[in-house]
Amino acid sequence: MIERYALPEMARLWADEAKYALWARIESLVAEVQARSGIIPAGAFEIIRSTPAPAVEAVRRNEQLRDHEILAFLAAYTEAMPADAARWVHHGLTSYDVVDTGLGHTLAASCDLLLTEGRRLLTALAGQAARHWDTICIGRTHGVHAEPTTWGQKMALFAFAVERGLRRLAAARTSVAVGTVSGPVGTYADLPPAVEAHVCGALGLAVEPIPSQVVARDRHAELLSAIAVGGAVVEQIGLEFRLLQRTEVAEVEEPRAVAYQGSSAMPHKRNPSTSERLVGLARLLRANASAALENVALWHERDLAHQSVERVILPDSLTVAHFQLSTAAGLIEGARVDAERMRKNIGATRGLIYSSLAYRDMVAAGVDRESAHRLAQSAAKHAWENEQEFTQALKEAGVEVGASDFRPERFLTSRGHLRQRLTNLIEEYELDVAH
């Protein structure tokens, strides 16, 4: 787990203390149904249930001797138990009955945290979209001024991308929220299925329908792939903010701490550090998704090749994604949108962005398409090279232009259906959005 990017609630889920407490609970749940079925003595279950999870340091000391975390856990867990009770701990289980079932519970809880922050980001984006639906700005293709759009439409595009990510993540949560308590190679040789049903039911998990010895790793690959796609969407948002914060653009600015300092050498710097961080973290998520795909193919009923990888990629991906979503939500919630600068930047090309209007108006007036396009293109080239207003260049080329022909609003007269789609999204998710 990358401590720098682990928010407290996610860090608690992946702490060793939480893992060993969960393992102890699983052992107790197994003993409970075994005692009820007469497999182990009822008195042994009472002792198992009342025994606290072992301290992390005790497990680590034992693991140095045994090179096996579950056996180290069991040794520390049963150390203070009477022998007549201790011998029934882990009865009929294999290590991964505990490890994977506990992991399914932790992954599901982690997904819930991601879904909460993802919904917060969705709310922030939908709010920006609604408030700035008519805040006109220039659209850019290939990084070059194209035609006017609005800040609200740009934010709505991101809102729908985040919403798709939430649906992918919810589906992946269902896939990973499973456990198996089926014994060595998954045959239930010493464990009636009722034990598994009781344990998984108590933990809010489904059951792996046909187990081997482990939960199938395509489930985890699905989760980390969904997280990576979601991270790429957040990266897209961060990249947009990075580009729009450049000095020569300056249309938005990310929120700053009161004591913010952007450079140790240049006091004037106001760097897009939050946006850049969002972009960088997405790279980690993509790399970890690739590693998760490598873990799907295990030898026969299981091998150990996946374990060392998962110890890194699962906590790292969940904590990084949680941090990234939370940070992105804060970015959108606190962003400063400079509508005046956006309007000013529309005029940066001295009217070249209206070339498509000139072209279409000429076609509507009877000029053939190719001639109209070439004429508008030639006037645009002349205006740019001579630092001239596009309207003047058109007039010099013999094209009559009215005083009100070229306005950014002319591009934005057919967007009612888009606004309705945004409204539908806000209503579907019952988002707390101030219009």
Image (spheres, rainbow, N blue to C red):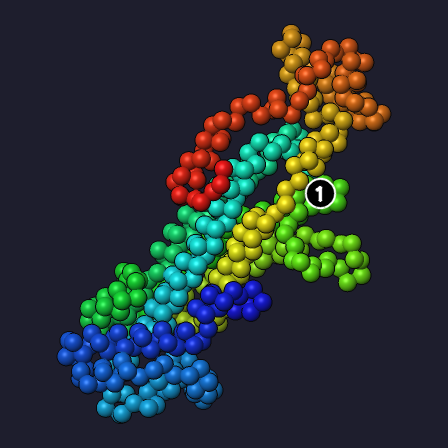
Q: Quadrant of residue 301?
A: bottom left
Is 366 placed above or below 180 here? Answer: above
Asked whether 136 or 232 is in front, the reply is 136
Residue at left offset 75%, top offset 45%: 247
Residue at left offset 65%, top offset 36%: 339
Asked whether 37 or 247 is in front, the reply is 247
Residue pushed farthest top? Answer: 366
Provide residue 199's location: percent of width, then percent of height: 26, 69
Residue at left offset 30%, top offset 62%: 204
Please indicate, yes or no, whether residue 222 appears anywhere in the rendered image: no
Please indicate, yes or no, whether residue 169 appears anywhere in the rendered image: yes
Q: Residues within 10 Å of mark 1 (few under 14, many from 20)?
A: some
Q: Is residue 97 left or right of residue 274?
A: left
Asked whether 110 or 130 is in front, the reply is 130
Task: Report the amino acid beneath label 1.
Answer: Ala
Residue at left offset 44%, top offset 55%: 116
Asked whether 355 or 420 is in front, the reply is 420
**Which residue is labeled 1 in the image?**
250
Residue pushed farthest left? Answer: 38
Q: Quadrant of residue 406?
A: top right
Circle 1 sits in a helix, a strand or a loop, which is it?
Answer: loop
Provide residue 209's location: percent of width, then percent of height: 27, 60
Is 78 placed above or below 316 here? Answer: below
Q: Is residue 268 left or right of residue 255?
A: right
Provide residue 139's location: percent of width, then percent of height: 64, 33
Provide residue 206's location: percent of width, then percent of height: 29, 60
